[in-house]
Amino acid sequence: MGDKVGVRRSSSDLDSVGTGGGYGEDGNRRGRMGAAQPHMMGTEGDVTSSSVLLKQIYSASGRTIRRSRSEKVEPTAHSHALEGNLELLKIKISSAGADVKDPLEFTPLHFAACYGHLPCVEFLLEQGAGVSAASKDGLTPLHLAARNGHTDVLARLLKAGADFEAEDSRKGRPLHNASGHGNVGCVRALLEAGADKDAVEEDKWAALHYAARFNNVENVEALLLSGADVNAQDVDGWTAMHNSSRNGRLKCCQVLLQHKADVAKVTNHGETALHVAVRKGKAKVVQAIVDHCDKEGVYAAIRAIRDKGGKKVDDTECSPHIKAILRQENQGRASGYDMVFAGATEILEESNVVGIMSRACSIS
């Protein structure tokens, strides 16, 4: 039905070891850092160390470094940068150099930026670390600072000349990473630096798609106020309005509508945002779209649009409450029945995948 569940979307998705994607346990997209496997390291100790560091940089909490007592991390410049241990980092850098790379071509600066260790970032830059050094998957320290909401580190990297339009292997840019993760400070800093607000990644997701998909209202507003295209469509024809409607993001939908989101835009499957909201059982969003269409005098026209299967919104299976909204028989909040009717499927769809959007220190 034109749904996006389980579809790999963009390089700003993280949290999984491997190059795959998809949606996470919390309904968020899962991402990757282009993970080559730890067997690329030489010795047994190195294998264990690399494996542990990869798990941490993919899925650590961003504040707490977690690892099993049985897991071994050989002390390296990378591990010291990850842990924010500046004194030991200085010792390692004196012999290894500031731009020493692991098998995936991550440098200590990647790890320090990912975990928000500003003193380590400052030191590495002073030692000549490449501010826009790219991993094998094209990820730069700026991608990682943006992904994890480290505004101070991001600002320092920008000051040092970091490439704010750097693309990873799926054309994901730092602004894509920042937009999906709720830190409006990072979004604003990148926009002020001149980041292209409408740049798209491989699947033609713009920053606004990410912000809307994950209900980051402040980011949605910041992007729209900067002039981002509210009606930009991805490779499947989805707009930010479709993304918000699918997930019942009422506030985001309201902001998008206020900024002239085109409710007549259809996906490649022929669905309007109203089709999507009805199909997913998002009664509050359905109500908001119906009210908007009624106010603009276009409700009859929107209601008449048929998807590729020939269905109008009224033909879509949904709860009696939503049917009543479509017929404009009542106004108000979604009923408990609605939540049960539509929510069960939603929960089922999104409960078996691994999330990108925890505020984890993952790499997009």
Image (spheres, grey):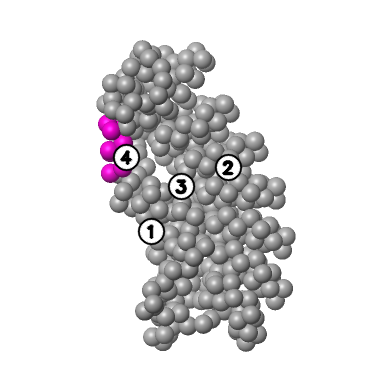
Disc 2 packing (10 Å; few <14; some 14–19; many ≥20): many
Q: Indicate which disc residue 20 carries.
A: 1
Mark 1 in CB contact with mark 2 (< 8 angstroms): no
Q: Main secondary structure of the magenta part?
A: helix
User: Where the N terminus falls, by quadrant?
Assistant: top left
Whether 326 is drawn above or below 260: the answer is above
Q: Residue at x 53, y 36 (%)?
A: 232
Instruction: Pick whichever of labels 1 and 3 is earlier in the sequence.
Output: 1
Whether 95 is drawn above or below 203: the answer is below
Read off the magenta span: 340-348
Whether 39 is drawn above or below 281: the answer is below
Amino acid tagged 1? Gly
Badge 1 marks a residue whose secondary structure is: loop
- CA gap, disc 1 and disc 4: 22 Å
Q: Indicate which disc residue 203 carries.
A: 3
Q: Residue at x 54, y 57 (%)?
A: 148
Mark 2 in CB contact with mark 3 (< 8 angstroms): no
Amino acid tagged 2? Asn
Residue marked by disc 4: 346
Residue 336 drawn in magenta = no
Locate residue 164, reporting x and y percent: 64, 55
**In which quadrant of the rendered view does residue 284 lie?**
top left
Locate residue 100, reporting x and y percent: 58, 78
Residue marked by disc 2: 219
Q: Residue at x 39, y 64 (%)?
A: 18
Residue 21 in sight from this viewpoint: yes
Amino acid tagged 3? Asp
Amino acid tagged 4? Glu
Badge 2 marks a residue whose secondary structure is: helix
Drawn side of residue 276 relative to residue 233, left or right: left
Disc 1 packing (10 Å; few <14; some 14–19; many ≥20): some
- CA gap, disc 3 and disc 4: 23 Å
